[in-house]
Amino acid sequence: MIVYVCAAVAGLGLLSLSGEAALSEDDFPIIGTYTRDTACTATSSARSELLVRITRAQIESQLGVCRIVSRTREDRVIAAHVECKVPGAAQPILGDVTFTLRDDKTVGFEDQDHTSDAILHRCSG
């Protein structure tokens, strides 16, 4: 569902929240731009198929755009229910994804079907 995530929910593998105003930035510390399964460098960040952008409202990747419907956080794990629009799909796809903050400063990503799991590497700036 991370757009790669989106695709995962669709069988391959990615936020507007009620009550979001009450949440602090610490509740969703993964906002940013990432590369999928490779360190973020000038070369990797220029490859659109590797880019993943996460905002408070959505997750974007080459595979589509996912709106975060709801989310919860427990320690280092953020669980989200997402609605994804995948190119070629007539209807939005609903699914669940999990982000895990890792000690090495990356973010583990898992979709409900484990078809698009990834390690996200944050890009600076």
Image (cartoon, grey):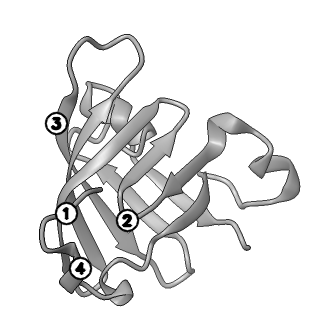
First in residue order: circle 2 vs circle 4:
4
First in residue order: circle 1 vs circle 3:
1
Question: From the viewer's perspective, is 42 left or right of 90?
Answer: right
User: Disc 3 designates what residue?
Assistant: 94
Characterize the local packing of mark 1: few (<14), some (14-19) or many (20 or more) Cα atoms within 10 angstroms.
some
The residue mark sitting in front, 2 or 3, is 2
Residue that sits furthest to the front in the current view: 21
First in residue order: circle 2 vs circle 3:
2
The residue mark sitting in front, 2 or 4, is 4
- At label 4, the amino acid type is Ala
Q: Position of residue 69 (x, y in %)?
A: 18, 53
- At label 3, the amino acid type is Leu
Above or below residue 102? Residue 7 is above
User: Disc 1 designates what residue?
Assistant: 17
Above or below residue 36? Residue 106 is below
Label 2–label 1 contact, CB within 8 A: yes
Characterize the local packing of mark 4: few (<14), some (14-19) or many (20 or more) Cα atoms within 10 angstroms.
few
User: Disc 4 designates what residue?
Assistant: 21
Front residue of 54/121: it is: 54
- At label 1, the amino acid type is Leu
Above or below residue 25? Residue 61 is above
Which residue is at 38% across, 85% downward? 25
- At label 2, the amino acid type is Arg
Front residue of 94/35: it is: 94
